[in-house]
């Protein structure tokens, strides 16, 4: 399983994927808003989204695991 982590502190603005969805390496899973900028959180591997561990509007911390992707 690959853990997808937030690279910085920010407000989780939008989740653009869902559990069970097939994703390719570097696909955007969700978008953080920090300092009025939109920062994509991408998957490090090709696979299937197994879990989304955060909700839209939630503040996430740097290094926090936000999703789990099972490699294909």
Image: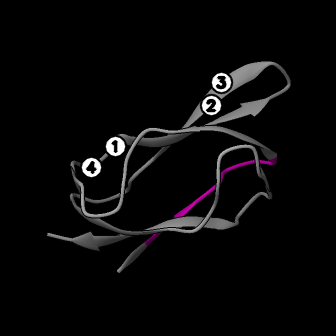
Is 62 covered by the magenta stretch?
no
Q: Is residue 4 left or right of residue 58?
A: left
| Residue picked out by circle 1 | 26
Q: Residues within 10 Å of mark 2 (few under 14, many from 20)?
A: some
Image marks 3 and 2: residues in contact by CB distance under 8 Å? yes
Q: CA distance from mark 3 to mark 4?
A: 20 Å
SS class, disc 2:
strand
Horizontal and vertical percent position of residue 62: 77, 57
In this picture, which residue range is highlighted in magenta? 3-9
Residue 66 percent coordinates (x, y)? 58, 63
Would you name the residue on which mark 4 appears?
A: 25
Marks 1 and 4: in contact by CB < 8 Å? Answer: yes
Identify the residue at horizontal 70%, vertical 66% (top origin): 64
Give the residue at the far left of this rendering: 72
Quadrant of image for the N terminus? bottom left
What secondary structure is found at the residue carrying circle 4?
loop
**Pointer 3 local density, CA inside 10 Å: few below 14, some 14–19, many at least 20:** some
Where is mark 2, residue-wise? 39
């Amino acid at each position: 399983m690959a853990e997808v982590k937030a690279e910085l502190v920010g407000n989780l603005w939008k989740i653009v994927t869902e559990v069970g969805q097939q994703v390719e390496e570097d696909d955007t899973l969700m978008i953080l808003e920090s300092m009025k900028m939109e920062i994509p959180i991408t998957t490090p591997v090709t696979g299937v989204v197994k879990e989304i561990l955060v909700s839209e509007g939630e503040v996430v911390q740097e290094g926090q695991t936000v999703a789990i992707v099972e490699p294909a």
